[in-house]
Image (cartoon, rainbow, N blue to C red):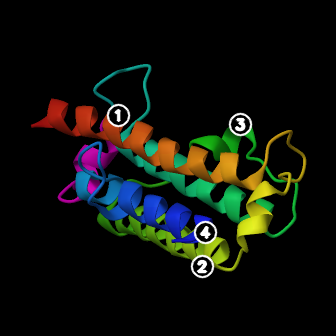
Amino acid sequence: MSQIDFVVDQLKRAFDGEAWHGPALMEILDGIDTKTGAARPIPEGHSIWELVLHVAGWEKVAIRRIRGAAATLTDEENFGHIERIGEQEWRHAVETLRQNHTDLLNAVSGLSDSQLNDRVPGESYNMLFMLIGVVQHAAYHGGQIALLKRSRS
């Protein structure tokens, strides 16, 4: 298995399932409705919805970096802004997360193993470090979402 194949496999596992650590992000999000997604059981904490927007935003940043841009998120973009709480808006947020992840998998699949050693534009680390960070990011926020989901049951 090439390094790229390994990274793609790890991205898929952390996002869709069969991860070593337990349920993957999309498995955790399964069954979450609009009300649960928007709830804020920890008053100073983020909602599940905001965490979904956050992960989606950073996956988009990773894509832009792979394509050569020195990209980041503004403070406002980092956890998104929910204009209206509704079923359609919640589904759109989850669909955006799914689409960004699909786009990321396609971008990573187009890299060569040697490109994993390339420095990320505007950063001091390489592509491999960033992509392993994306895997860890999905697992980390998946754990937060699981706790928030459980608090609503």
Tell me the residue that label 1 is attached to.
144
Say what amino acid the circle numbered 4 marks: Ile
Say what amino acid the circle numbered 1 marks: Gln
Q: Are marks 3 and 2 in contact (CB under 8 Å)?
A: no
Q: Nearer the viewer, residue 31 or 6?
A: 6
* x and y, in percent, of residue 91 in the image: 35, 67
**Label 3: element kind:** helix
Cα distance in 3D space between marks 2 and 4: 11 Å
> Sequence order check: which comes first, mark 3 or mark 4?
4
Q: Is residue 38 left or right of residue 110?
A: left
Q: Which residues are magenta?
A: 29-39
* On screen, residue 119 above or below 87: above
Q: Nearer the viewer, residue 93 or 107?
A: 107
For discs 1 and 3, the disc positioned in front in the rendered view: 1
For discs 2 and 1, the disc positioned in front in the rendered view: 2
Tell me the residue that label 4 is attached to.
4
**Residue found 17% across the figure and 58% down from its top:** 31
Tell me the residue that label 3 is attached to.
75
Say what amino acid the circle numbered 3 marks: Asp
**Label 4: element kind:** helix
Q: Are marks 1 and 3 in contact (CB under 8 Å)?
A: no
**Residue found 62% across the figure and 53% down from its top:** 131
Q: Is residue 150 visible?
A: yes
